[in-house]
Image (spheres, grey):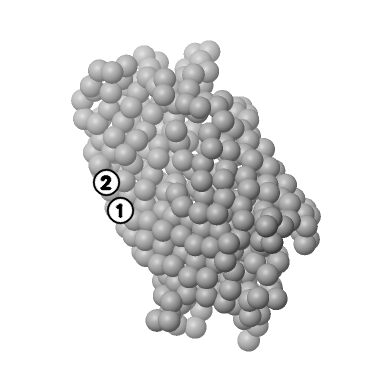
Amino acid sequence: MKISNKIFVPLAILPLNKIIAQKKDSIPQKVVAFVTDKFPQSRDLNVEFIQLAPHKYSSKLYGESLPDNKIKNLKQVKVNANFYFIKNAKWMLSTSLNYKYTSVNAENPISIFPKNIFNKQDFHYHSESLSLTRFSKLFGKTAIYSATASVDGSEQHFERVRGMLAGSVIVTANANTTFTLGLAALIDPSGQIPVFPLPVITYKHNFDNGWIADIILPSKIMMRKNIFTNGRFSIGTDMDNTSFYIYQDDKKYEFRQLEINSGASYEHKLGGNFIGTLKTGMRAAPNARIFNKEDTFKDYILEANAKPSFYFNVGISYNPFGKPREK
C-alpha cells in the first residue's frame, strides 16, 4: 500500500502547530511563538522545484522482465496551499490543495502499452481535501479527532475519492518535549485493504546542545538546529510519493511510486512571511507500480525498481496567516 506524507497532515502536524495552543498554560510563550510562527510544519502556500540526477531502473511487465533503462532527466514541480475556514479552541475546518508536475526523459523508449511509446512525457496530478478537526479531552489529556475527505485526478478528469478518520492524544507537552500517540484509518478503494488502520506517532524534543528531534512516524525522522539569526539546518529522512494517471484507449491506469529522501536541508526566514528552502541528498524509490484504476495496488501490470539517485530541491513558502516574528 502506498504511504503518503499528505495523508498524515490532518493528524500529524496539528500537535505541533495548532494543538500546542491548547496547552499555553504549560508552555512558555516564546516556545509557542517559535513553533507556530518561525518554521511551521504546514505552510499556507508552498512551491518547490525538484531535479533528479540520471539513474537506471529495472522493471517487469506482467511478470516478464523488460530491458533495463535509464532516466536521463526527471524534474518535478510541487505546489501546495492550505486554507482555514474555521479555527478556534474546539473546531478547525481546513482545505488542502496540491498539484504535482512530473517530467520524465528516458534514454530508451518506454513501452508499456502498444499505442503509448515515449522517451519524454509530462504528467499532471492534483489532489484536494477537506478536513474537520475537533479538539477535546480524553483521560485528562488533550485529544484531537479529525475526518478528511479527498479527491484527486489529472488535467483530464477527477479520478478517486478517499477518506481518513484519525484520533490522537497529546501524551506530553512542555517547554522541551511534545509527544503524541494516534491512530488513523485510511479509506482507499485502491488499497489492498479498503480500510487500513495505521498508528501515528509524533515526537519533538529540544536538546540542551541546540539540536531538535522532529519525528513523525512512519513518514519522517529529522534532526534540526537553528543557525544564524533566521536559519534552520536539518538532516534526516522523510517519505514522499509520486502519483499520476495514464490513459490508454478507454482504460485508465494509475502510477504510484514510494520515495524515501535522505539528506540535508536549509531553511531561511526571509522578509515578511516568506521562507526559502534548499534540500539535497539521495532519493530511493524501492517500489513503483502501474495498475488498472479499477483494480487495487496489488493487482499491478508493471513493477519498477529505480536505483538511488541524487536530488536537489529549491522551494519558497508564504504564510500570510502566520504572525510576524517579534523582534
Cα–Cα gap, marks 2 and 1: 6 Å
Image position, residue 14 (x, y; %):
62, 58
The one of 86 and 316 positioned closer to us in this rendering: 86
Q: With 309 as the anchor, is 301 left or right in this view?
A: right
Q: Are marks 2 and 1 in contact (CB under 8 Å)?
A: yes
Query: How many neighbours does mark 1 have within 10 angstroms: few (below 14), some (14-19), or many (20 or more)?
Result: some
Q: Quadrant of residue 58?
A: top left
| Amino acid type of the residue that numbered disc 2 sits on in the rendered structure | Pro
Residue 212, numbered label:
none
Q: Residue at x 28, y 38 (%)?
A: 306
Disc 1 marks which amino acid? Met
- Front residue (pair 298, 50): 298
Residue at the image position 61 percent from the left and 60 percent from the top: 170
Inspect this view and state whether residue 36 appears: yes
Reading the image, the residue beneath label 1 is 282
- Residue at the location (69% across, 55% down)? 138
Q: Position of residue 238 (x, y in %)?
A: 41, 53
- Between residue 97 and residue 167, name the one nearer to us: 167
The image quadrant of residue 45 is: bottom right
Q: Which mark is residue 308?
A: 2
Image quadrant for the N terminus? Answer: top left
